[in-house]
Amino acid sequence: MNTSDIAKEAVRIGGQKALEFFKARDQLTIDLKGPQDYVSEADRTVEASMIDFLQRQFPNDGFLGEESSEIKQARQWVIDPIDGTTNFIRGLPYFCTTLALVENETVIGGWIFDPTRDELYEASLGGGAYCNGQQLNPTWRKSFSTGLVGICHSSKLTAQELAGRITGALERGAILRQPGAAALMLCDLAAGRLDVLFDQHLKPWDSIAGLLIAHEAGAIVSDYLSHPDWRTTPQVTFASGPEIYGEVLELWPETRNISLLSNNEQP
């Protein structure tokens, strides 16, 4: 198997194990890491199983996981065992397992598996974006007045800041969605089901696989790795269809200074 095939197998192993835990979630031990920030034994077990599988294939690679200590190497796998943990533990079937490959500070591959719908999204840098082997060719809406806007919410964003962002989008006629798993929302954007997504404080395992997938599907996306402290400091996660991007800059001034992933063209 090549690297991509191994990555797909790893993310499927994790996602299928997560789904098993989801079906028996009433038996899980759940801890609180911070305000509305949950972790369960499922998160830890899924991540450990993915790392174990990948280490056997690539013993010299490094790892950056949400629930484990970092192993530093020039080539590093970034893992979120369950993105959407709150949904997961509350019985909402909107969560996923994510995996990204970073080499020399560039994201070269991203894989996201939604086990409840058996959908595996993947992208390689310069190689396009796919879902279950079919290339994604999305069509995005051109304006907020016809668009569907994904809203993420972190504890670092004040209620006033979030309310202002929401009000501005609503005043322009947008419909909002806040399903609660940023990585899967980026897949929805890559598939053309969302037109805009923006969060200022997401962590790398929530973001970088989905950003690459959206980028390779043709969206304008933020360059998460443009900040040297991206591993330890939450960064902006932004994606939009190309034609709605100009209106985003008008509506949300904080998006104007975002570094964009290369090969995206600004209007």
Image: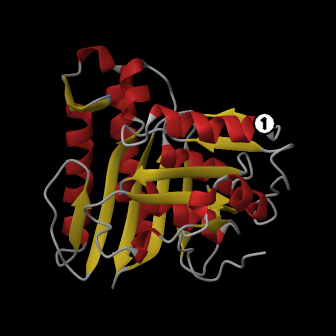
Residue 131 screen position, x and y as percent: 63, 56
Q: Is residue 41 visible?
A: yes
Name the residue rendered at 72%, 76% in the picture: 266
Residue 227 screen position, x and y as percent: 37, 73
Q: Quadrant of residue 10?
A: bottom left
Q: What residue occupies the far top of the structure in this picture?
A: 26
Name the residue tied to disc 1: 171
When the figure is inspected, residue 97 is found, relative to residue 17, above or below; the finding is below
Secondary structure, mark 1, is helix
Q: Count the marks.
A: 1
Q: At label 1, which amino acid type do we have?
A: Glu
Of residues 150 and 137, which is closer to you in this image? 150
Residue 45 screen position, x and y as percent: 21, 40
Q: Is residue 176 left or right of residue 51?
A: right
Question: In the rendered image, which quarter contains the N terminus?
Answer: bottom left
Name the residue rendered at 84%, 52% in the picture: 143
Q: Quadrant of residue 262?
A: bottom right
Of residues 245 and 211, which is closer to you in this image? 245
Question: In the rendered image, which quarter contains the C terminus?
Answer: bottom right
When the figure is inspected, residue 105 is found, relative to residue 89, above or below; the finding is below
Q: Is residue 186 left or right of residue 61?
A: right
Of residues 233 and 140, which is closer to you in this image? 233
Q: Is residue 133 visible?
A: no
Of residues 207 and 1, which is closer to you in this image? 207
Packing grade of label 1 (10 A; few <14, some 14-19, many >=20) is few
When the figure is inspected, residue 109 is found, relative to residue 95, above or below; the finding is below
